[in-house]
């Protein structure tokens, strides 16, 4: 298995291009199941999760080709098939095929989803909403068996604005009879992108971008192309890294800066100078971090996905910082690995107390999830000597090439 070797890096300079969004393209790929035709997706990130989703689509006789960053999806031969656990367990977003399969075939036999182990990741909200739409289900041996004689529009209030449940219920509702009103839904940019894409496919919706969405089901879907937006979490990762390492960098490919307003605010609070231009950001910092108190939250709050990267950044702070995680229970796998480098971090219930300013010493550390892995790369850049990050397949799920991106900025980093 590949690993990454990182040497302490004093400065980052240059330009970095931000890849297309993982969390946007995966639900759009799931949405293509609804129609019949050819859809071309531009700016598709070349990452493991996209390959895994392509393989799942291929089980449904949906043909995919990825050339450069252009993904072509051909659903003209689409046919119902069960999706085995060995394949669905490769990624969390496999569960997003449930909604479109029910909308199209009124049945789905689908393995439980996998994805990063970042806390409890139940699917009860997905299932409760689908039950309201008249879906019966049972679970056996990691397989979920769902069917409905008549997918019926409904009113449903999500007890928590889960991103995945919102996407799944929207996707199912597109094929339901009558209207579905979903209340208390998530409002992440990925959901707005999905809704706008579905509108172009022929679905009538009201309330896009608010927490109440009305969807009128249809059976007439038009296959549509899609130009993917930038990945706000990847951009945020590099922005926080830039705050922690003295730098003068330009981040290009950021088409809508609003999607990362909160991360820019936090990076500025940490001490980075962030200059917003039309389609790029300029970031300068001297690597001095202001300690502070931070909290993750649902969009538009600071994203939970960047919590491990923020924690690593705060190790550079001259004093004590606190980070409270409010979205996932115990998403703290970063702590034990950072301690191996000499970090002083205490877990106090859902909050981390980070004592910054201590010298970090390179060591071998293990990636156990996507964003935690990226945070370990940052910690390696800040640690004396050499750091090896192992199990980097987790990082490859969501970052196209973190090594090449950072090497272009002058980091001393390589695959081993
Ligand atoms: C998505 C993102 C992930 C991000 C997360 C929160 C993708 C592919 N992944 O994950 O990167 O960290 O949003 O922004 O888009 N929950 C339940 N029951 C459910 C569903 C969720 O209790 O049925 C809880 C979860 O345990 C968690 C919280 O809701 O505590 C948020 O989860 P959710 O928004 O569903 O995250 P994902 O869609 O899995």
Image (cartoon, helix red, strand yellow):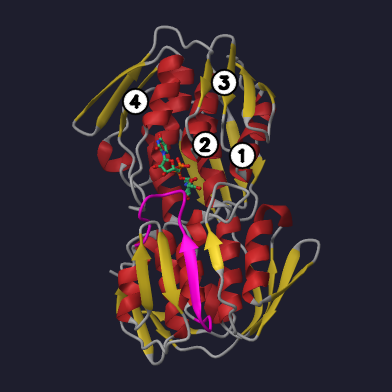
Whether label 4 lies within 8 Å of ligand 1 gets the answer no
Label 2 environment density (alpha carbons within 10 Å; few <14, some 14–19, many ≥20): some
- Residue 68 sits in which quadrant? bottom right
Q: Which residues are magenta?
A: 316-332
Q: Which residue is mark 4?
A: 81
- The one nearer the camera, 108 or 127, is 127
- Residue 92 sits in which quadrant? top left
Quadrant (top left/top right/bottom left/bottom right) for the N terminus: bottom left
Q: Nearer the viewer, mark 4 or mark 3?
A: 3
* Label pair 4/3, CB-CB below 8 angstroms: no
Q: Which residue is mark 3?
A: 174
* Label pair 1/2, CB-CB below 8 angstroms: yes
Q: Earlier along the polypeptide chain: callout 3 or callout 1?
A: 3
The quarter of the picture showing ligand 1 = top left
Quadrant (top left/top right/bottom left/bottom right) for the C terminus: bottom left
Check the image and report above or below for 413 versus 185. Answer: below
Query: Magenta stretch mostly in which secondary structure?
Result: loop
């Amino acid at each position: 298995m590949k690993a990454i070797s990182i040497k302490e890096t004093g400065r980052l300079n240059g330009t970095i291009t931000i890849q297309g969004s993982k969390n946007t393209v995966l639900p759009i790929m799931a949405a293509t199941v609804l129609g019949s035709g050819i859809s071309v997706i531009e700016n598709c990130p070349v990452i493991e999760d996209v390959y895994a989703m392509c393989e799942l689509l291929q089980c449904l006789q949906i043909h995919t080709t990825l050339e450069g960053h252009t993904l072509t999806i051909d659903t003209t031969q689409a046919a119902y098939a069960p999706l085995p656990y060995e394949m669905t367990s490769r990624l969390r977003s496999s569960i997003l095929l449930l909604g479109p399969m029910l909308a199209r075939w009124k049945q789905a036999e689908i393995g439980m989803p996998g994805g990063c182990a970042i806390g409890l990741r139940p699917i009860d909200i997905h299932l409760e909403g689908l039950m309201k739409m008249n879906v019966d289900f049972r679970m056996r041996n990691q397989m979920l068996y769902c069917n409905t004689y008549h997918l019926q529009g409904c009113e449903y209030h999500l007890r928590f604005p889960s991103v995945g449940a919102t996407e799944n219920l929207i996707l199912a509702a597109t094929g339901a009879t009558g209207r579905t009103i979903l209340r208390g839904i998530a409002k992440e940019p990925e959901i707005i992108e999905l809704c706008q894409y579905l509108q172009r496919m022929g679905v009538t919706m009201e309330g896009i971008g608010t927490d109440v969405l009305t969807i009128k089901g249809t059976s007439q879907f038009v296959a549509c192309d899609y130009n993917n937006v930038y990945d706000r979490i990847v951009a945020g990762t590099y922005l926080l890294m830039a705050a922690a390492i003295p730098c003068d960098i330009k981040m290009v490919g950021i088409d809508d800066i609003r999607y990362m307003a909160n991360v820019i605010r936090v990076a500025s609070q940490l001490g980075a100078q962030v200059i917003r231009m039309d389609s790029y950001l300029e970031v300068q910092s001297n690597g001095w971090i202001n300690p502070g108190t931070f909290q993750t939250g649902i969009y538009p709050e600071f994203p939970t996905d960047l919590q491990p990267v923020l924690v690593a950044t705060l190790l550079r702070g001259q004093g004590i910082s606190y980070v409270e995680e409010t979205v996932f229970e115990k998403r703290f796998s970063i702590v034990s690995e950072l301690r191996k480098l000499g970090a002083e971090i205490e877990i106090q219930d859902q909050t981390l107390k980070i004592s910054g300013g201590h010298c970090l010493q390179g060591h071998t550390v293990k990636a156990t999830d996507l964003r935690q892995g990226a945070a370990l790369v940052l910690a390696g850049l800040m640690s004396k000597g050499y750091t090896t990050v192992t199990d980097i397949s987790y990082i490859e799920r969501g970052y196209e090439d973190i090594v090449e991106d950072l090497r272009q900025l002058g980091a001393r980093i390589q695959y081993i």
